[in-house]
């Protein structure tokens, strides 16, 4: 193979490794009120409570990918992408969630897919990234079984419309996050705080997932694979004391295994069922659900990893009047000496990515997987721009390298890892944080007509992809 870099390659990845990035519709498309798109919960919540969004910035424009996808895909190619994940906006494709398909949306997604393929970039398509159509939320969102059926129909339409060219599909991105945000901790619409409803939403999201997988099997897309993308946040106990270990085990059950086990093994962990039953929080289930989950396991697992979860046994009895939350079972623990991202208050613990992969190998049948998000958010990143306009984000290069060393080691130890996607391609709008934390390999200059400029990390990523290692 041609050696493009002068540097020797110490960490070489398997042939055909996927190098690319991940994005989501609401975070990059913009054109929120254009092209016949229906409103989703983000458009609605922003209209209701703009002050909840960083600097009052909502999702109307974001990075304007809707109008600039050609330029952006050219940049992806330039920085070495061989694959790229985006999501379809359900409310763009089917404005009211259940009715007519919006032909302008079909045109747009066809154009994006064709442009990616023409540039040698494999499209990875996710069906749901936090963006419930408003009409669907107004009848209860994931709490309502009708919404599950509407979602399954939407999924099946997507397979019909785009499955001739898109071979890699995902049902959900981080399905725990809308549960946490929307039903426990008040950072997504509908801003409910109710453990019982949260459990029901989580359960129904998995039923929706299984129905989408079933629809995918019926669609029989040649060479197609379907999966789910989970933010598997490893839970580390403060110590090996049994009470700390138990606290970490419960956090793992609630936040990771509540989706991982049904998706990969086709069943919920017995300990989770017992825990919920003990506290009288089992969700309402229907006849046939168990078989549906059993029969519709995934082909491919996407793993998002940002930071670990460190917990300890509870030190005080919970206040019986406070709302019931997962923290009923553990307290968070800030490990002394832990490494922090100085620009966004998250811990950096590179080995976590390895621990997740080894766990998947040992306990989940070594299912085919890839790193579907990993990245470093930086507040105030504009200060690292030089006169030429380039952002010198050496910290991001180091962040990626240090994580990739652990991914490499996991591959050497026999894990079935097929690729690495960074969050994210270009700086984007992020939920209530709006443009606060920048994650892109490409900068988007908000002061300058959303001008795109490749960051230092973008050039580094190019050499990483071209050399299939570093
Ligand atoms: C992940 C989500 C992304 C993105 C990222 C960064 O959980 O899948 O959509 O938002 O986190 O989050 P933030 O911008 O809040 O730092």
Image (tube, helix red, strand yellow):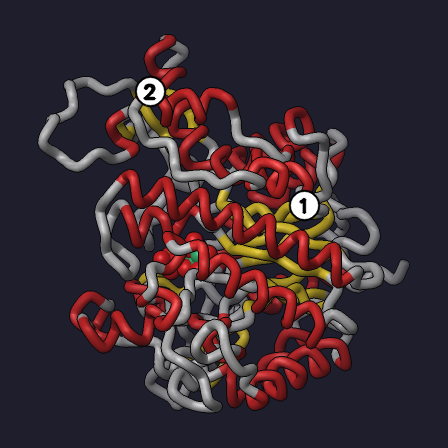
Q: Quadrant of ligand 1?
A: bottom left
Q: What label does residue 61 carry, if any?
A: none
Q: Where residue 395 sits: x, y (%)?
A: 46, 54
Identify the element where label 2 is drawn. helix
Between discs 2 and 1, the one toward the N terminus: 2
Identify the element where label 1 is drawn. loop
Residue labelled with disc 2? 278
- Which residue: 47% across, 82% down? 388
- Which residue: 40% across, 83% down? 32
The answer to which image quadrant residue 377 occupies is bottom left
- Is 156 in front, or is 465? 156
Left/right placement of residue 175 relative to residue 464 reads left
- Disc 1 crowd rating (10 Å Cα; few below 14, some 14-19, many 20+) is many
Q: What label does residue 298 carry, if any?
A: 1
- Is 409 in front, or is 158? 158
165 w.r.t. 280: above or below? below
- Which residue: 49% across, 45% down? 231
Q: Where residue 156 sits: x, y (%)?
A: 64, 66
Residue 17 visible to the viewer: yes
């Amino acid at each position: 193979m041609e050696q493009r870099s002068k540097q020797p390659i110490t960490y070489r990845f398997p042939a055909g490794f996927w190098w690319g990035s991940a994005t989501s519709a609401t975070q990059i498309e913009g054109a929120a009120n254009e092209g016949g798109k229906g409103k989703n919960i983000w458009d609605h919540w922003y209209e209701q409570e703009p002050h909840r969004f960083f600097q009052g910035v909502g999702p109307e424009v974001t990075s304007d990918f809707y109008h600039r996808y050609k330029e952006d895909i050219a940049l992806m190619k330039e920085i070495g992408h061989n694959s790229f994940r985006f999501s379809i906006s359900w409310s763009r494709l089917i404005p009211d969630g259940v009715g007519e398909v919006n032909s302008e949306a079909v045109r747009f997604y066809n154009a994006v897919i064709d442009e990616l393929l023409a540039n040698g970039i494999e499209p990875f398509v996710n069906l749901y990234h936090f963006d419930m159509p408003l009409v669907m939320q107004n009848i209860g969102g994931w709490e309502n079984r009708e919404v599950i059926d509407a979602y399954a129909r939407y999924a099946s339409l997507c397979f019909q419309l785009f499955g001739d060219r898109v071979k890699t599909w995902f049902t959900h991105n981080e399905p725990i996050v809308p549960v946490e945000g929307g039903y426990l901790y008040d950072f997504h619409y509908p801003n409910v705080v109710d453990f019982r409803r949260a459990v029901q939403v989580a359960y129904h999201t998995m039923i929706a997932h299984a129905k989408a997988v079933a629809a995918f099997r019926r669609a029989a897309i040649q060479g197609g694979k379907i999966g789910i993308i989970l933010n598997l946040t490893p839970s580390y106990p403060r110590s090996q004391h049994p009470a700390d270990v138990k606290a970490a085990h419960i956090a793992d059950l609630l936040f990771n295994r509540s989706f991982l086990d049904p998706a990969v093994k086709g069943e919920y962990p017995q300990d989770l069922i017992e825990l919920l039953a003990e506290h009288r929080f089992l969700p309402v289930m229907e006849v046939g659900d168990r078989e549906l989950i059993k029969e519709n396991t995934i082909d491919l697992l996407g793993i998002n990893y940002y930071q670990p979860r460190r917990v300890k046994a509870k030190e005080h009895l919970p206040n019986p009047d406070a709302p019931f939350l997962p923290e009923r079972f553990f307290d968070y623990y800030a490990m002394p000496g832990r490494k922090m991202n100085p620009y966004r208050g998250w811990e950096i613990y590179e080995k976590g990515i390895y621990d997740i992969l080894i766990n998947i190998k040992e306990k989940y049948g070594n299912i085919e997987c890839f790193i579907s998000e990993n990245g470093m958010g930086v507040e105030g990143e504009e200060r690292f721009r030089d006169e030429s306009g380039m952002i010198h984000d050496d910290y991001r290069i180091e962040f990626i390298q240090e994580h990739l060393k652990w991914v490499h080691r996991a591959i050497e130890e026999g894990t079935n890892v097929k690729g690495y996607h960074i969050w994210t391609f270009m700086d984007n709008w992020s939920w209530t944080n709006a443009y606060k934390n920048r994650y892109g390999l490409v900068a988007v200059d908000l002061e300058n007509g959303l001008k795109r400029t490749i960051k230092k990390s973008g050039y580094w990523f190019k050499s990483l992809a071209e050399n299939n290692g570093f």
